Amino acid sequence: MPQLLEKIDKNSLPRHIAIIMDGNGRWAKEQGEDRLFGHYHGVESVRNIVEGCAELGVEYLTLYAFSTENWDRPEYEVAGLMELLVSTIRKEVETLNKNKIRLHVIGDMSMLPDFAKKELNEALEITKVNTGLNLVMALSYSGRWELANAAKEIAKEVKEGKLRVEDINQETLQQFLCTAHYPDPELMIRTSGEFRISNFLLYQLAYAELYFTNVRWPDFRKANLYEAIIDFQGRERRFGKTGEQIAETNKAL
Ligand code: IPE
Ligand code: IPE
Ligand code: MG
């Protein structure tokens, strides 16, 4: 692992890494256990990856923990996940503070049970002075929900005369997203061998580098994160330009 860490160029780290933490259920089934067992073990990976990002100096880490579609899972699983969320936050707030990590939440909070909302709000309040890693939890989140919500908010501003239709542009839309204050992720990782976005950050991932691994989330550790970052750093990000143009710009720097 130290060898992997040495291969990372600290000067071109992604500022923002987003992760779809997938594969808990299958990981548990493979060991003849209940799906919730996988979610419990997934928490250990969260701890490890948050620590890894903080150590590296990554500024933003967004973790997809629960989608709006996940509400349709069996009741016992949803209830188990909510309890796990609350107990984890309660246990971890102190460590977050110690490591100067600031917690953020994106998603439709109105869907969360009251006890979860209360615990989350307390943690947001307690960690809001921290200036280290920004840990963004996507909870009851989906990109389509977020975009519909932004459209509604923009329409309200127009109706109230605060915004003119002619002035609406990409910048305006960006300001009404849950992620208005964060840079777009440069690297998006999905674990467990699925090659899809599953309604995650649809707008923000426009130019993100996507990295897929077969490793199930409960097995994902710092070494896997380092591999993803090394892979990211080997890519040429062109943003619609030609490779020659990019080479020219790099030469000028
Ligand atoms: C990801 O693991 C965690 C959540 C979606 C809450 P899954 O629960 O989706 O696990 P698989 O994909 O069924 O293995
Ligand atoms: C995406 O995983 C959501 C989270 C990891 C929280 P899912 O397991 O819900 O996605 P699909 O259903 O396989 O696309
Ligand atoms: Mg899944």
Image (cartoon, rainbow, N blue to C red):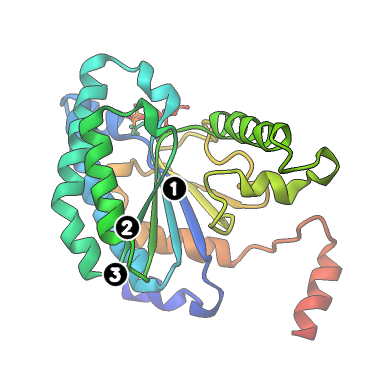
- Of mark 1 and mark 3, the one earlier in the sequence is 1
Residue under pointer 3: 100
Q: Which residue is more in the foreground, 143 or 149?
A: 149
Looking at the image, which residue is at 18% across and 45% down?
A: 88
Asked if labels 1 and 2 touch by Cβ distance under 8 angstroms, the answer is yes
Which quadrant is home to the C terminus? bottom right
Identify which amino acid the numbered label 2 is placed on: Ile
Residue under pointer 1: 19
Identify which amino acid the numbered label 1 is placed on: Ile
Identify which amino acid the numbered label 3 is placed on: Lys
Q: Which mark is residue 57?
A: none
Element on which disc 1 rests: strand
Q: Is residue 183 left or right of residue 151?
A: left
Q: Locate residue 64: give its quadrant.
A: top left
Residue under pointer 2: 49
Q: Which residue is more in the foreground, 167 or 211?
A: 167
